Structures are given as C-alpha cells and as structure tokens.
Amino acid sequence: MTAAPHSAAPDAAASPFREAVVDLDAVRENIRMLAAAVAPARTMAVVKANAYGHGAVPVARAALEGGAEWLGVADIAEAHALRDADIGAPVLAWLHDPGADFGPAIARDIDLGVSSLGQLEAIADAAASVGRTARVHLKLDTGLSRSGVAPEHWAGTVARAAELEVAEHVLVRGVFSHLANTSPDEDAAQLAAFEHGVEQARAAGLRPELRHLASTAGALRLPATRLDLVRIGIGAYGIPPFCDGTTAAELGLRPAMTLRARVAAVRRVEPGTGVSYGHTWRADRPTNLALVPLGYADGIPRQASSRAEVWIAGARRPVVGRIAMDQFVVDVGDDHVATGDEVVLFGDPRTGAPSADDWGDAADTIGYEIVTRIGPRVPRRYLGEA
C-alpha cells in the first residue's frame, strides 16, 4: 500500500527540472592557481569535448581570463567553434579525420598537431593552396601508443618538416607528446624519450618555440615535465587528475559543475516493495522513495545503480534500484521530502554533496567521464559570466 505523494515544495516552480550549473569563477580560480604553480611554463586550457561537458565557449573565455594563454581541442571542428565565437587566442587541434580539409583551419590561424608524415604533407599541401604558412606541432609517440609519430619515423619526419619550413609551407611552432601517468619511473622514461625527439628536431634545423608534455597530473607531480607549456585539462574543472583518493580541496581546486534536479514524485512504500527494473532492490522497512528525473539518456551511469548517493534535504542518500533512461529512485527513509525539492547529484563536496569522483567510484570509472557524459537534455546555467 502506498501513501499519497507529498505536496510540492513552495518554490518548485522557480527552480529547473534538471540543470548543470557551471561556476565560471571556479574555472578562473583553478586556472589562476595552476598557472601560478607551473610558472614560468605557459598554460593551455584544454576545452575539447565541449569543455569536458561544461560548455566550450564560456569555459574558454573564463580560462583565458584566468591566465591561460592557449586553448586546446581535439578536432578542427571544435577549434572552428571557438573562432566562430570570436575567440582569437592561440588554439591547437591535434586529432584529425584522415580526409580532413586543413585549409580553412590554416586560414583561421588554428595550430595543427601532426601525428604522421602523411599528415604533415597534407597540411603543407593545404597551406600552399590557401597561400599561408601552417603552424604545426609535431606529436611524438613516447610510449602511450596512440597517435603520434613512432620513434623509428622521428628522424624522417623532422627532416621533412625542416624542408617544408624552408619552403614556408609550415612553421614548426611546437613539439609535444602525452604522458601515460603510469608511474614516476615510466613517466621519467617518457620524458627522456621526448627530450631525445626534441634533440632530433633541433639537429634537423627546427627551432620549436614550445615543448609540451604534461597535462594536469604531470604538471603538479612531475615538475621536470612542465617544459615550455602545460596542458591543463581536468584540473581546470576542479576535478583531481590522480584517481588515488586525492581531493580537489587538497589540490586547491574547486569543482566547477553542480548537477541538480527537482524531485519529480515521492511515495511511501512497505517492506518487500521492489524498485525499478528487475526489482534488484526491495525495501526492507517502510520508507519514502523520491523520484529524480535524470537517467542514462542524460549521462547518468547505469553502472552506479544502487551504489551512488545524492544530496537531498540536507543529507546524502542512496540511489536504489536500477537507474533507467530518464529517472532513478532515492531512498529517503522517514524524512520528509516533497516534490520539487532540490536534488544534487554531484558538485563541490565541501557543501556536503557527492563529488563527480564519488559517482565515478560508484560506476567503476573516473570523474572525467562523469562530467563529460552529461547530455544535451540537461541545460547548462552559468554563474560568473563576464
């Protein structure tokens, strides 16, 4: 037997059904702190994947206001979106479609990562076609085994890059790689391999302005990897990069995103009542259940079913039963929770709410994935816009 739902909270109509609140002041503060920590190295704010789900354009502007000198994206389309928003700061794009048209990017002063001799030739051809010199950063594979010029091809690639510089088709502005963040010893080996690659570039006659290897993790824990430029990704969003229990507060970071919703329904249930698909959870006592209108269509991981917690009515409370496409259920015990009450899935843990990392732990993943996967049905609201 179920009781009638509780009445709506008085301010329910004033708050959104679901939203991600992004604090741009937190982005500015995080960048400012990290830039100071890694100086004199320069700072690139990585805003790929819609700024890890936070919104590329507003975050890019906030990061630049916080002291970032560069912006980094994965693909050219993301770089064009920044230029379309009249953001003129240096932008590097490094992951390319095999058939990419590099001409428009070169014309818009977008720097291009180069991961193979074939890409270098294609970029040089595009530069010749638009009558501009392409600014490129040669990416060396130093052990991550993803993109990047393999060590056996470094010598040939830098030699060809030097020829193309003489022809004024390209300017090698940078040389870069990416740490695997496996262990201090393996990261040190990658640094040594990278320095060897830079030596080969210089021996070929190249004089790159920027050497960059470290992301947030390396920049904080391995000062030797900071070099000329560090790429700040997850740290800009106030999420720890280490996945070892280190908190944002311990690093001086503040989480920028708070994911929240309103309780859509409340009901009282008796012992033995099953919840959601498959009845993987049953009430073991009389209790109140709150329905939250977010699900895996919004990026909430189904893997966190009956494992994650949310913040409702001044306490962390458990998600129970399977998370569905559009909704999930929270056990609030005998406490009074009404329809329209605020639910915080994650945010700044200093407020009592779970963190993105807490949800990552519940879903056997990382905080990076939790924020990045929040879908387009969840509107973003920005605090601290200039």
Image (cartoon, rainbow, N blue to C red):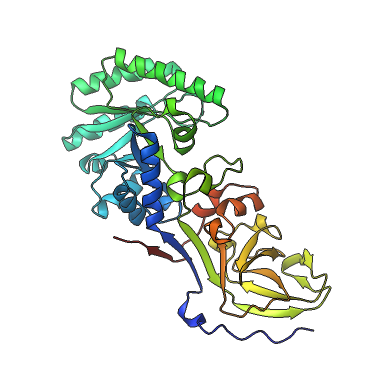
- At 24% across and 18% down in the image, what residue appears? 163
- At 41% across and 16% down in the image, what residue appears? 196
- Identify the image quadrant of the N terminus: bottom right
Residue 313 seen from this side: yes
**250 over 219 or under it: above or below:** below
User: Is residue 264 shown left or right of residue 207?
Assistant: right
- At 59% across and 64% down in the image, what residue appears? 295
Quadrant of residue 40 within the rendered picture:
top left
- At 32% across and 39% down in the image, what residue appears? 92
Residue 55 horizontal/vertical position (percent): 39, 56
Please, which residue is most extreme toward the left here?
131
**352 over 125 or under it: above or below:** below
**217 over 56 or under it: above or below:** above
Q: Nearer the viewer, residue 339 or 328?
A: 339
Total labels: the figure holds 0
Residue 34 horizontal/vertical position (percent): 40, 41
Residue 25 horizontal/vertical position (percent): 37, 56
Please, which residue is most extreme toward the top here?
203
Quadrant of residue 219 within the rendered picture:
top left
Residue 113 horizontal/vertical position (percent): 35, 33
Residue 97 seen from this side: no
- Identify the image quadrant of the C terminus: bottom left
**323 over 66 or under it: above or below:** below
